[in-house]
Image (spheres, rainbow, N blue to C red):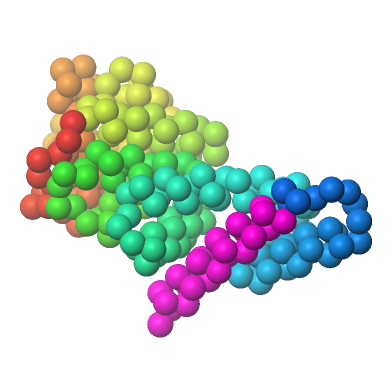
Amino acid sequence: MSTVINEKVLIQFDTNIKQLQREMKTIQGNTKKTTDSMEKGFRNATLAFGALFTAQGLKSLVRYADAYTNLSSQVKLVTNSNTELAATQYQLYKIAQDSRVSLEATTNLYTKLARATEDSAISSEELLTVTETINKAMIVSGASASETTSVITQLSQGLASGVLRGDEFNSIMENGSRVAKMLSDSLGVTLGELRAMSQDGGLTTDIMLEAIATQAGRSTMSSIRCLRL
C-alpha cells in the first residue's frame, strides 16, 4: 500500500513539474493571469511532494524542477518501467535523506552502478543496498558534504570504468576512510595491500561490489556475473 502511494505521489509530482515548466515558457509579462497560473502550479507541486518546497522562492523551484528532470532521466535509462522508475526514485530520495548525501550524488552513484552491472543478474534492490552502504560509510568517515560528494563521484567513476585506481582511489583513501576500511576488511587485506591492489588493477567493479555488499550483510556474488567492464 505504501509503495503504491509513494509511486502515485512521485508520478503526480513529475506531472505537475512538467506542467509548471510548460506554463513558464508562455510567460509574456507579469500579468495577473500569469501569476495565478504559476501559483497554481507551485501549489500543486507542493501538495504532491509534501513540504519539500515550502518557503522556497520560485527561482529555487525552477532550479529544482530542472535538476529533478535531469535526475529522473538518468534513472529512467536504467529502469524498465514507470513503476520501477517511481519506486527507484523514491528509494534514492530516502537513501539521500537518511545518509545526508545529496540526491544528485546518490542518483549518480546508483545509475553508474546500474550501467556497470547491466549484463549481470544483480537486482535493483541489491544495487540500492550497495548505494546506501556507501553513503552511510561516508557519514562514519566524518567527511564534509563537499568531500562526500567528491568521494562518491570518484567511486562512481571507478565503478563505471571497471576498476578503481589512481586519483579515484586516492580520493577514497583521503576522504572516504570508512569506505577504504570496508573494502580492506571484506577482502582480508591491509590498507597498504589495498593500495597495491588498486595499482595492479585488482580493484575491479565485481570485486568492489561484492566486498561492499558483504559488509552490508547481503552477499551478491551469485548475482554478479559477466560484468561489462
Left or right of 25 on screen, residue 81 = left
Q: Quadrant of residue 108?
A: top left
- Tell me how many marks there are: 0
Asked if residue 169 is positioned above or below residue 54 in the image, the reply reads above
Q: Quadrant of residue 178?
A: top left
Q: Main secondary structure of the magenta part?
A: helix
Query: 139 or 103: which is nearer to us?
Result: 103
Segment colored magenta: 1-23
Q: Residue at x 55, y 39 (%)?
A: 145
Query: 44 or 124: which is nearer to us?
Result: 44
Left or right of 180 on screen, residue 63 = right
Q: Is residue 177 visible?
A: no
Indicate whether residue 157 is drawn in magenta: no
User: Residue 146: image x %, image y %?
Assistant: 55, 34
Asked if residue 184 is positioned above or below residue 48 in the image, the reply reads above
Asked if residue 229 is positioned above or below residue 45 in the image, the reply reads above
Q: Residue at x 25, y 39 (%)?
A: 116
Query: 188 or 157: which is nearer to us?
Result: 157
User: Residue 32: image x %, image y %?
Assistant: 91, 61
Indicate whether residue 13 is drawn in magenta: yes
Locate the N terminus by quadrant.
bottom left
Locate the C terminus by quadrant.
top left
Asked if residue 12 is positioned above or below residue 118 in the image, the reply reads below
User: Residue 193: image x %, image y %?
Assistant: 18, 23
User: Residue 159: image x %, image y %?
Assistant: 28, 34
